[in-house]
Structure formats: C-alpha cells, structure tokens
Amino acid sequence: MRTVNSRSAAVGAAGLALALALTACSKADTGSGSSGSDSTGQSTQALNVVFIPKNLGNPYFDASDAGGKAAVDELGGKYSQVGPQQASPDAQVQYINTAAQQHASAIVISANDPKAIGDALTQAKTAGTKIVTFDSDTDPQYRDVFVNQASAEGLAKAEVEGIAKEIGDSGEIAILSAAANATNQNTWIDLMKKDLAANHPNIKLVDTVYGNDDDQTSFDKTAALLQTHPQLKGIISPTTVGIAAAARYLSTSDKKGKVALTGLGTPNQMRQYVKDGTVKEFYLWNPTDLGYLAAYAADSLVKGDISGKEGDSFKAGKLGDFKVGAKGEVLLGDPTAFNSSNIDQFKF
C-alpha cells in the first residue's frame, strides 16, 4: 500500500569470529556470490541484501524489514537482517564490515548517525557493495540512494498541526525523540521548531528529551517530563517506540485526557491507546512499503539500472514506478493520519 496522506571492527581472529557469529545469528544466510558484469556492463552478482536497522527488537523495523524480505524473495535473492540491540552511533559499524567481508551485493541501513558509520560504508562501497539508506540517512557521500519515508517538511507540519489542534493552539509542549544523533529525528525537530515559531506563537516548546528508541527509557522520560513541567499540555514523539511508551504511561496516569500526545506510530502499537482515548491522532507511512521500496532500489543499483543520480527511474514491484530526486533521494509518499475512524483498516 502506498499511503496518500506520511570504527571499524577489529581485524584478525576477532574479526573472523565476529563474522561467523553474525552469520549464525542472522535471520538468513547472507551468502557470498561472485561479482562481475555481463557484456552490457550490468552486474551478474546474485542479489544478496543485508538489512541493518537502527536496533533489533523494534516493531517499526520488524515491519520495514519484513517488507524488504518480501521484495528480496520476489526478486529471487537472499535476505538477512543483522544489527545492534541498542541504537547508538557506532553500534552498526561491525555489521557493515561483516556484510562487506561476506560480499553482500547491497546493504540497506537506517543510520543511527549521519557520520559515525561513514568510513565503514565507504569501505563497503569500495569493495563493491551498493549502499541504500532508508528511514534515517547518512551524509550523501556515504551511500548510493536514500529511500525517504515522506518529506521531512510534510511530517513535521502534520505533527505540529496535530498537536496545535488538540491543545487549542496554545500552551506548553515537549518533544520525546529517539537518539540525540538520529538524522531523521533532528531534521524533523528543526522543522517543527521553525513551524512553531512562524505559525504558532502561542505554543511554547519547553523541552526536548531522548528515549534512545528504548521502551523503558522513553517511558521514564515521559514521567520526568510531566513532573518537570506541570503545565505541559502536549507531547510530540516522532518515534514509534517513544510514542507507544508515552501512551502507555499516560494511559494509567492522571494526565490521561489532559496531556495530548501525537507523533509517529504504527497502528498495531497504538490501537489500544486510540480506543481508550489516550491518543486522538498520530501519523506514519507504511513501514512495510518503505522496506519493500528500499529492497527494490538496492536491486536496481546492483543491476546497474540506476546509479543514484537525479532523474534515474525504476520499478518497485507492486508499488509501481519511482524516480530518484535531488541528492539521490527516493520518496515513498505522504504521511497518513491514524485515528479512531480508520485505525482498524490497518494491520501493521
């Protein structure tokens, strides 16, 4: 479904042991495959895509990576998912290195930091691995294509307008974000601040806190926000882990119905909180489609159908045709608003 409205790891024995361990615990073998090209210059390497989310055990990335697996299966390639348990700037480096050492044809990664994984990605690219970022980008020189879930401006505007509507366009609000270095989060927050200053002068952003995409940390940060700011009228959480944890706290607190909560979440996580009145409306795109599109972009890069330059076009299976925009960006579509009137229509 396309939505219509959202250091290097140590080498030697230790590096070998890590590679073997990662191969054993990945969801599917990454394989090696031999690289090469046919007479047209296109790659003859078997498609072998490694998905590296910000962290494992995150429902959002479970959904997006499932979409990636479906696409890779359709394309007759090999799929695997590896990654850190905790989302931190350097935690993804060892997995990038291992994928490159195993000659993955493509890495699809949601970056925990725009620069920290840059050297590892550059080495992978030099070794012949195509790099697709999705959800959260790196600096452009480190990847071939960025598959963006929705425009940053559209997402920021939807969240600001949503909270403004719920609190009568006046009062104190706070932001509960993911990791402090997450590219997408910081981009959205900067745009929200600009929108608030320009269009909502009676709304005051009093605090921005970071739950590191960890449920308990986000839950605790929500409690602390409400204690620190007793006049708080609303919270925006542009992270699926954060909004669900904040909703869980509010749902059993005396602030339920008094402090508005919106942000980015998945319907399956948020359904109970919409139905019990804790949350009126939140936003997202279909993360399964995002992973699916990222896998097709990876395949097109591996085949040589696209290079990541502006104007390149490719077909992404059931999602149809897409074009590469400025700075190698491919846009999935606009965000969708989820509320009591439509949430049961969505099962992700």
Image: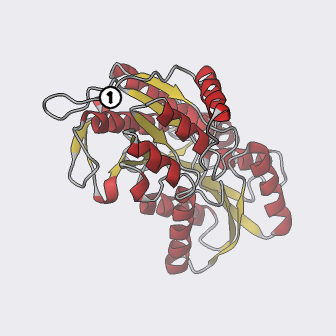
Q: Nearer the viewer, residue 54 or 195?
A: 54
The extreme left residue here reads 39
- Looking at the image, how many numbered discs can be counted on the residues? 1
Q: Nearer the viewer, residue 313 or 60?
A: 313
The answer to whether one can see residue 336 in this image is no
Q: Vertical placement of 154 versus 321: above or below?
A: below
Q: Is residue 88 left or right of residue 140?
A: right
Q: Vertical placement of 72 versus 278: above or below?
A: above
What is the three-letter code of the residue carrying label 1?
Ser
Q: Is residue 121 left or right of residue 340?
A: left
Residue 344 image position (x, y, % from top left): 54, 32
Q: Vertical placement of 58 versus 243: above or below?
A: above
The extreme front residue here reads 12
Q: Residue at x 79, y 45 (%)?
A: 216
Q: Residue at x 21, y 38 (%)?
A: 305
Where is the N terminus found, in terms of image quarters?
Answer: top left
User: Toward which corner of the image does residue 9 lie, by quadrant?
Assistant: top right
User: Toward which corner of the image does residue 2 lie, by quadrant?
Assistant: top left
Residue bearing mark 1 = 35
Report the coloring of the rendering. secondary structure
Residue 340 image position (x, y, % from top left): 57, 41
The answer to whether one can see residue 326 in this image is yes
Q: Nearer the viewer, residue 317 or 300?
A: 300
Q: Vertical placement of 92 versus 195: above or below?
A: above
Q: Secondary structure at mark 1?
A: loop
Residue 247 image position (x, y, % from top left): 72, 47
> How many residues crowd mark 1 within 10 Å: few (<14), some (14–19), many (20+)?
some
Residue 24 image position (x, y, % from top left): 62, 20
